[in-house]
Structure formats: C-alpha cells, structure tokens
Image (spheres, coloured by chain):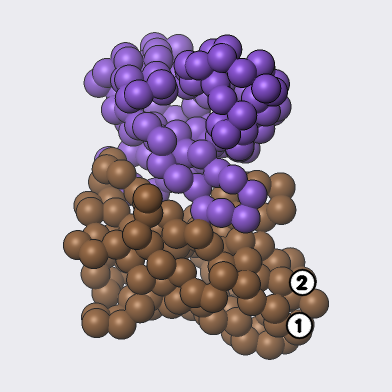
Amino acid sequence: NSKVIQTPRYLVKGQGQKAKMRCIPEKGHPVVFWYQQNKNNEFKFLINFQNQEVLQQIDMTEKRFSAECPSNSPCSLEIQSSEAGDSALYLCASSPTGANTEVFFGKGTRLTVV
Amino acid sequence: QQQVRQSPQSLTVWEGETAILNCSYENSAFDYFPWYQQFPGEGPALLIAIRSVSDKKEDGGFTIFFNKREKNLSLHIKDSQPGDSATYFCAASHTNTGKLTFGDGTVLTVKP
C-alpha cells in the first residue's frame, strides 16, 4: 500500500480562485512527481523534484501553476487562478531514486472548478 | 503522438479466466515499464514492472511478457477475480528522466 499522503482528497473552487494541494512523500523517497489525470483518464506530467530542486517541469506557459517541495514541510501544488479546464485528479507520487525504480502514487486530490 | 498505446480499451472475462492486456510504445529509449491498477476515486497502485533487459516478469498471479524488438508488452492476469475489475495502465520511462508516460488504460471487468 502506498504511503504517499495527499490532502485534501476533494477541493472545490470557483473560477479565478486559488487552489492549493499538499503531498507528503513516502519516507526516504527524495523524488516527487505531480501528475494531472483528466476525466478521460489521460495523465499529464507536471513537475518533479529531487529533494527541494526541480528536475523537470512542463512549460507552464500560463504561469498559473507553481509547485515546491521545501525541506521538512509537505510538497505543494498551487493553481493561482483556477479555470474550469483545471478540474481533474491531481496525483502526487514518490520514488526512491526516480530513475527507473518504483514510483508510488497517493490517492490524489480531486479538484472541481465551478 | 501517442507514445504508449493500450488495447483493448475494455475487456470482459469470466471469473477464473486469464485476462490479457496489451501495450505498445514508440520511443526506443524507454527501458522501464510498470503496470498500474486504478479503482474509481483512487490513485494508481503499482502492480508489477519490468526492465527492458528482461523478457518476462512474474509476481503472484501477474505476468509481464516483453518483446523489445517489437516494442510491445502484455500483462497476463491469471485466475481473474471480480475484485480485479479496475482500469489498468501501462506506463514507460527511461533512465535519463524517470518521468512516466502512460497509456490510456484498459478497463477490465471480471464477471462472476
């Protein structure tokens, strides 16, 4: 069973509101990923970290998404100004190395933008 | 361009049968292939994974058959049970990035 903890499980925001979700990776896993899964079950990689450093991220050209993994605090993903198209399941995952080893997902945060 | 493809989109088998889920990929640099099981409202759970240096991996009732030359693989679920009814995702990554690329999933229904 995954030990990746995501909060909250459900989040409802109005358009234009800020949405913030958190993730505690499995103990001893320095690599953290964020994915978005839409209602068609398509996964979109957003960003990953090794400890506090960003490894890769998509071109968040709209600049509405930001993420961080501070030391001794949960990782977080924030959407500055939510849009209806952001409604999705946001999945956090962690891995011991990130390079072709097991990646374990949390239960996700279901964001609904009304 | 869909880098990881799964078939069929949906599959129904009877309890006790072997379910066979297929996956193919485009990128020859992919060298790690996990399969995930996802129930409605939950995150994906890692089932079993294979590295491209192997052609078969077994774990309990799950077996992956991998064909590097053809760039495809399959997941066999032996003695399927109704509790195995879920969506199964094939994913792929390569050593340089660790980032997973997912297929669109196969919805498996196991009828009692």
User: What residue is rendered at 66% in x and 16% in y?
Assistant: B14
Query: Where residue A23 sits: x, y (%)?
Result: 41, 71
Q: Is residue A109 visible?
A: yes
Asked whether, in this view, residue A36 is left or right of residue A55, the answer is: right
User: What residue is rendered at 19% in x and 62% in y?
Assistant: A28
Asked whether, in this view, residue A75 is left or right of residue B110, the answer is: left
> The disc labelled 2 sits on which kind of residue?
Ala
Label whose residue precedes the other's in the sequence (2 or 1): 1
Question: Disc 2 vs disc 1: Cβ atoms closer than 8 Å?
Answer: yes
**Outermost residue, left side:** A28
Query: Where residue A59 sits: x, y (%)?
Result: 52, 64
Return the residue at label 1: A15
User: What residue is rendered at 32% in x and 20% in y?
Assistant: B58
Query: Where residue B15 sits: x, y (%)?
Result: 61, 18
* Chain containing mark 2: A
> The disc labelled 1 sits on which kind of residue?
Gln
User: What residue is rendered at 24% in x and 60% in y?
Assistant: A29
Residue nearest the observer in this picture, B62 or A42? B62
Tint applied to chain A in the drawing: brown
Residue nearest the observer in this picture, A4 or B54? A4
Return the residue at label 2: A84
Q: Is residue A113 above or below residue A92?
A: below
How far apart marks 2 and 1 lie (CA) works out to 7 Å
Query: Callout 2: helix, strand or loop?
Result: helix
